[in-house]
Image (cartoon, grey):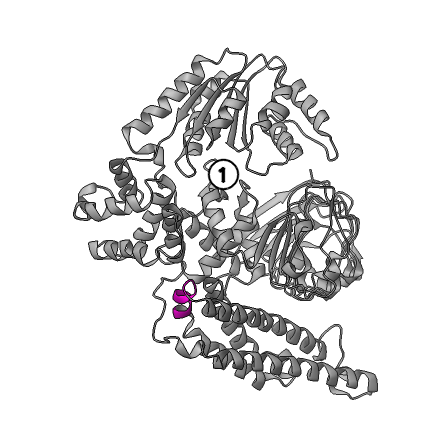
Amino acid sequence: MAAILESLLGSCASKLQNIITDEAILILGVEEELREVLRRVELIKCCIYDAEKRRTKELAVNNWLGQLRDVLYDVDEILDVARCKGRKLLPDDPSSSSQSATCKGFSISSCLCNIWSRRDVAVRIRSLNKKIENISKDKIFLTFNTSIQSTRNDPTSKLIRSSNLVEPNLVGKEIIHSSRKLVDLVLAHKESKSYKLAIVGTGGVGKTTLAQKIYNDQKVKGSFKLHAWICVSQDYNQITLLKEVLRNIGVHSEQGETITKLQRKVAETIEGKSFFLVLDDVWHSNVWTDLLRPALHETTVGVILVTTRDDQITRRIGVDRTHQVDLMSVEVGWELLWKSMNIGEEKQVQNFRNTGIEIVRKCGHLPLAIKVTSSSLASKDLTENEWKKYLGKYIGSQSILLDEVELALYLSYDELPHRLKQCFLYCALYVEDSIIRRDEVTWLWIAEGFIEEQQGQLLEDIAEEYYYELIHRNLLQPNRISFDQAECKMHDLLRQLALNISREECFVGDVESLRGENMSKLRRVTAVIKKDMSVLPRVDKVEVKVRTFLTVRGPQRTEDTLFKIFLLLRVLVLNYSLVQSIPDYIGKLIHLRLLNLDYTGISCLPESIGSLKNLQVLSLRWCHYLHVLPSAMTLLSHLRCLDLFGTEINQVPRGIGKLKLLTHLGDYPVGDGSDNAVVQDGWKLEELSCLSQMRCLDLVQEISAPSCFSIELLTCAKHSKLYRKTDTSTPT
């Protein structure tokens, strides 16, 4: 929890410093109250590192940290409210007027409204100040050592791309031999009807890496007509899994298709063809016996490769051959440790050998733990003293976690700068074995406020640096076939660690299992929908403080009450859901930073969306029934990303150039709109000329648009990395 608080304190202090001189705050007259909040936050910051060290040993400290967390979130929320109410009082605000701001004109009702706004914000800030004062006077607070400070590096120090990271199966002769032996085994049975091969071993031992070497072997690729790699996971969905098989073999699936229909589709596609299938991370034998075996019965020849931790599963499946992956020997583990640190020769660390071998033992001889630990060591000076200090942390942290592997992973997490900790923990909201896409997760981090501005750098660029740093530290595993490591995964052992650390704030699962009282503490929720409808728990007497609400891909419906219950949302992701309309009261979600409605059936957006003054990301990819954007779109002054990829927009409001912070425009519809038109068929290219922060732009030319584009109009976009012209009247 303290790791989260360290980030919250830093973010809160930074926001307070920036907002105190904001016009919207000055007009409310609450700057002095906010300065007092800042003073107290800075005071508490001095002791948070000592509190973090003591939280697992002292219940009172942990309770104190819980109170602090709640207050800091409250501060974050009141800053949004203050800025929002203050803006409405400014003379140049579209929703206000000079008369309403100055009470000249005059309107008694508007003057009373302005007075009430000022008083309401001031009272709430004073109440928060009182809470913070009580926390700072608590007897626990008085025992903290304010001289102990974190010595962690800046998040992006020593940033190195992980293109040269060492795979566990590239060290140790026995591992190389295993890879060759298994490839030969697959090739020897390529004419078999349904030969089943299993790789068995504990979590993090390298089963998936070994399976990838076999799957990507050129001889194996050339021996089968069809190939599919399926991540099964512990809580797999049957329909989703069958659709993934179809996607792997190049077949499209439709929404609403039943299990039987999907099985038939698979059977028809593979009939008479050879097939190589990898089922990675199998926890239940029925994924084969009940789901896939009937569908694959028609294949002429095929090999099925299964990876699992449980050899009982291989017996139930009826595996023909099992390969056991053992823990690394001390020698091989030592080799992996120093090679993963990008050290050219062993002689550079020969003097540390005994210490290094002891670290390997503390990692449980597990490749994942060794690699993650090596990244932490690589961020330090290459001295034996540093290695011994790191080894000493295992002894000092014994009370935190009992399992030695989990302890090794925890210590590497603990070494992270606080902002990277937040980003790492957030990745656990993705369900097990999910693909994490760089462009998606970095927007989520920005929307949650994890990324702070730095001089001369866009938030998007800083977020990308964090993403690559987590990959370099082996806390995220890149997809080797994705360009520029734009996709990655989180190993389930690391994900479980992250969920354990953030368990008081995060929930991933069926929301129907939650009770109202549980909702009062949660800040982030991933709803795993097992039915066709997401039913939210009753929260009549509970204040819901959820900031992120994600739905897992699936054809689920979501209750409209979601927009009324989750009033503090910053992130709302409803992609792939059966949402068909967005209610007007979405405009009440004044804290919302990111709204994702990709692949939904919406046909329009309400004008109230213009009230979302803090909205930074609006994603509307592949919304086939959406053709018109509301005129209020141009009021979204903080919008950074508008993604319309695959959505055929033919009517837009004039004034896209007002959105000065835009950095990403996906499928920008270019038209020849009249200078006098309020609504037009597309935006004129000239409207982009003042968007100096643009870094990614996709253009779609409408039929009526001019036949040529002038790239000179975009020369002011100094951050631009991509310019792509799509010369078509209808996106595909």
Q: Residue at x 39, y 27 (%)?
A: 324
Secondary structure mostly seen in the magenta stretch? helix
Q: Which residue is denoted by mark 1 in the rendering?
A: 482
Q: Is residue 630 visible?
A: yes
Residue 176 x %, y %: 32, 27
Label 1 Cα neighbours within 10 Å, binned few <14 / some 14-19 / many ≥20 = few
Q: Amino acid at mark 1?
A: Ser
Q: Is residue 541 depicted above or below 225 in this figure?
A: below
- Element carrying mark 1: loop
Left or right, 385 with reference to 66: left
Count of numbered circles in the view: 1
Q: Residue at x 37, y 54 (%)?
A: 411
| Residue 271 drawn in magenta | no
Residue 513 x %, y %: 66, 50
| Residue 55 drawn in magenta | yes
Q: Quadrant of the C terminus?
A: top right
Left or right, 717 with reference to 351: right
Q: Residue at x 52, y 71 (%)?
A: 68
Q: Is residue 87 depicted above or below 630 in this figure?
A: below
Depth check: 679 or 612 in front?
A: 612
Depth check: 188 or 359 in front?
A: 359
Residue 22 x %, y %: 59, 78
Q: Is residue 655 visible?
A: no
Left or right, 24 with reference to 105: left
Depth check: 498 or 299 in front?
A: 498
Q: Is residue 47 depicted above or below 509 in this figure?
A: below
Residue 99 x %, y %: 78, 84
The quadrant in which residue 413 appears is bottom left
Left or right, 676 with reference to 357: right
What's the magenta region? 50-57
